[in-house]
Each structure stands twice: as C-alpha cells, then as structure tokens.
Image (cartoon, rainbow, N blue to C red):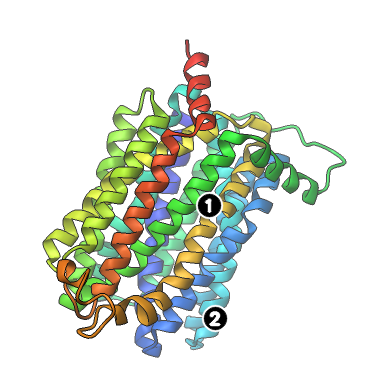
C-alpha cells in the first residue's frame, strides 16, 4: 500500500494542477473570444484524444513497464502546457496554440491513464482494491473541489501564465514519485510477435467473451451518458434563476459530495455485496438526478445534485472492483483501455446531443404555449430552463431503470460470488 500511496500522492497534486489549468483556460478563452463555442472546442480537444487513444495506451501498458509509461505520459503531456506558455511569452496569444497544446496534452494522458489503472493491480492485493478506488476518486475530485478556488485566487492577483507554471511543476512531482516506486517494482515480461492491433483486439474480445464484464461495460456506458447530461445541463438550468457565482458554488458543493463519498470508501471500504451496492447506488443516483430537475428552487436543485455526487463514488468503486478482479494481470492495460473507450463514448454522445435537444426539442415544449405546458408543466413549471429540468428527470429515470438491470443480471452476480469465494 505504501508504494501505491506514493504514486497516488503524485497524481493528487497533478490532478489539482490540471484542474487549475482547465478552469483558467476556460476563463481565458471566453474573455479573449467571447464565444462559448471556442470554450467547448477547447474542452472537446482536451477530452476526445484521451478517449480515442485509450485502447492504444492500454496495449502499451501490457507490453512495457507501466511505471515508465506513466513517467513518459506525464512528461510529454506537460510539454503541451509548456508550448502554450511559450507561445504566450512570445506574444502569440491566439486560439491555435491553445488548441494544439491541449490536444498534445490529451494524447499523452491516454498513455498515462491505462498504465495508472493497471499499476493499482500490480501494487495492491484484491482486498485493497475497494479502498484504492476510493483514494483514486479523491485525487480525481481534487480538480473540482480544490482547483477552481485556487485558480480563482491566483487569477485575482496574477495571470494564467502563473497557473500554467504551477501545473507544469505538478507533473514533475508526479514523475519523481513514480520514479521512486519504479525502482522497487518488477518489470513486466514483454510478449513478442504480437501486433498492437492484435492486442487491442484481444482486449476487446476479452470484454465481449466475458458476459459479466460485457454487461457491466454496457450498463456503465449508459450511466456515463446520463451523467454527461447532468454535467452539461445543470449550469444553464441554474443560470436561468441565478448567476455564475451560484453555479460556481454549486460546482464546489458537487465536488464536496463526491469527496465525502470517496473518503468514506477510502477509509472504510466496501467489504462485500459489490453487485448489490452497485445496483442500489445507481437507483439512488437516478432518484437524486430527477430531484435536481423537478423545481426552479435553487436549494432543492442543489440538494439533489449534492446527494447524487455523494452516492456516485459507491457506484464507481463497485464497478471498478468487479471488473478489476475479473481481468488477468497481464491483460489489465488493454482491457482497461478498451473499457474507457466503450464507457466514455456514452459521455461524448451526451455532450454532443444534449445542447441540441435542450434548445430545439425540450425547451420549446415548456414555453407557455408549448406541447407539455398544460400537462407536465403543471407539475414542474413552465418557462426557460424547465425543458432542461424535464431532461434531468428523464435522465434520472433512465439511470434508475438501467441500474435495476444489474440486480437481475446473473453474469454480474457471478462476478460477485466468485470474488467472495476467492476470499474464503
């Protein structure tokens, strides 16, 4: 556990730095262009390459030294930020350097993440997976809880270049931690005469042929889809009745909810009943998501979102453990890379369609003369933002129904039974 904690600490600082950069870049780009489309483009380029290339990163994580891949991923992803900073220093403050830099950064994050996930399996026993998953979520949530506040304070007295320098320094801390651990971990044996395409296919076939994992991946893709709706639509819905400051406070409240849930798991863990907890947490998540959309009252919306993110880590941890115990160590990298691609596709689809659905389908339904004004509108209200609220209600119902299928899925239950037997 000590070696894992060293790597985790490095990733914790790196997550804070990355969150500060993401926050600062969104403000910088919007102030420079006045365009939400450019902000969305930067977000997309900072996200998509990592998803699309995660299967490649997974194969490399199985072929080569995973700690070395983490070092390379951190160093080269940091170069993307160095490029942006350099262009700002020489006076080239346009959009092109930012787009190039965030894309370069995302490409090498794809190398880092599968290696990090596989390293957890290398360093820990099966009984420690649950707590480790909670710790990993704490590090990931730091970018939402700590980073916006820090970046906001720094931007009040300095400019974005200072934040880029801080983020670059966090990459160096991570590299140092991983280097120290790498010296004490046995290197994997490289497999010969296998093409990368073959190994990617091997990871995909492992998922397809393992009914339990296949079912989990399918379900979690839908969960990511519904969560993507919540992440995208909450801000615009709140802005209808409040202001940007309130949106920022609500974002911090969400992060606190996830942090509390992750700390609970990291400190206490989940001893057994992973499939049951996964099913129950998913149903609860769906209910709270629906609550967030039922009213224009900002307090009710905030409570629903807080409780949603409080229970989300339990769902993430259970899915993580159930998958992890089913994958042989030599396949961890490529399978996790393929799982990331398949599940996060749900998030990408949500990002692509939810704005169009809100603007052109659901919002018009809840105008005073809209199709649903005299029916559903009588219950949740009419006017701007109520179409978005109805979308959240439908998403919550969809998430709850999707989660209920877990409790009826024999293949997922068998993963749970096998794990409990292995610990007897």
Q: Which mark is residue 46?
A: none
Q: Position of residue 149 (x, y in %)?
A: 25, 63
Query: Along the horizontal axis of the image, is 106 left or right of 136?
Result: right
Camera sees residue 123: yes
- Count of numbered circles in the view: 2
Q: Quadrant of the N terminus?
A: top left
Which one is in front, 297 or 100?
297
Camera sees residue 258: no
Instruction: Please report the residue visible at 46 percent of the width from the left and 38 percent of the height from the top.
Output: 319
Which one is in front, 224 or 20?
224
Q: Mark 1 against mark 2, which lies toward the viewer?
A: 1
Q: Position of residue 238 (x, y in %)?
A: 21, 71
Identify the residue under disc 2: 97
Query: Along the horizontal axis of the image, is 95 left or right of 280?
Result: right
Identify the residue under disc 1: 343
Q: Are marks 1 and 2 in contact (CB under 8 Å)?
A: no
Which one is in front, 283 or 179?
283
């Amino acid at each position: 556990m000590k070696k894992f904690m060293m790597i985790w600490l490095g990733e914790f600082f790196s997550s804070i730095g990355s969150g500060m950069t993401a926050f600062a870049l969104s403000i910088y780009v919007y102030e420079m262009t006045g365009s939400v489309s450019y902000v969305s483009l930067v977000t997309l380029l900072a996200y998509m390459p990592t998803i699309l290339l995660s299967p490649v990163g997974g194969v490399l994580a199985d072929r080569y030294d995973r700690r070395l891949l983490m070092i390379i991923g951190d160093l080269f992803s940091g170069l993307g930020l160095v490029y942006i900073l350099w262009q700002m220093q020489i006076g080239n403050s346009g959009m092109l350097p930012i787009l190039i830099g965030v894309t370069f950064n995302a490409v090498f994050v794809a190398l880092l993440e599968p290696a990090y996930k596989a390293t957890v399996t290398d360093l820990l026993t099966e009984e420690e997976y649950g707590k480790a998953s909670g710790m990993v979520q704490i590090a990931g949530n730091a970018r939402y809880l700590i980073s916006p506040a820090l970046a906001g304070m720094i931007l009040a007295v300095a400019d974005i270049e200072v934040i880029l320098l801080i983020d670059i320094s966090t990459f160096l801390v991570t590299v140092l931690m991983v280097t120290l651990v790498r010296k004490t971990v046995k290197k994997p044996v490289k497999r010969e005469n296998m093409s990368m395409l073959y190994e990617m296919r091997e990871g995909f076939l492992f998922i397809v042929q393992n009914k339990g994992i296949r079912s989990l991946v399918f379900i979690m893709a839908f969960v990511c889809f519904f969560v993507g709706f919540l992440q995208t639509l909450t801000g615009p819905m709140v802005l209808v009745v409040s202001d940007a400051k309130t949106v920022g406070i609500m974002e911090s409240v969400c992060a606190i909810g996830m942090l509390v849930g992750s700390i609970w798991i990291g400190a206490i863990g989940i001893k057994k009943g992973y499939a049951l907890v996964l099913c129950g947490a998913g149903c609860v998540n769906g209910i709270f998501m629906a609550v967030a959309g039922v009213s224009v009252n900002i307090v009710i919306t905030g409570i629903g979102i807080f409780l949603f993110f409080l229970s989300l880590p339990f769902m993430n941890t259970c899915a993580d453990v159930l998958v992890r115990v089913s994958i042989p160590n030599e396949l961890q990298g490529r399978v996790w890379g393929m799982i990331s691609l398949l599940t996060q596709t749900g998030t990408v689809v949500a990002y692509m369609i939810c704005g169009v659905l809100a603007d052109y389908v659901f919002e018009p339904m809840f105008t005073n003369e809209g199709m649903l004004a005299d029916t559903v509108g009588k219950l949740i209200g009419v006017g701007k933002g109520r179409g978005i609220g109805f979308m959240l209600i439908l998403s919550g119902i969809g998430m709850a129904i999707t989660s209920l299928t877990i409790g009826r899925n024999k293949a997922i239950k068998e993963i749970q039974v096998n794990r409990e037997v292995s610990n007897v």
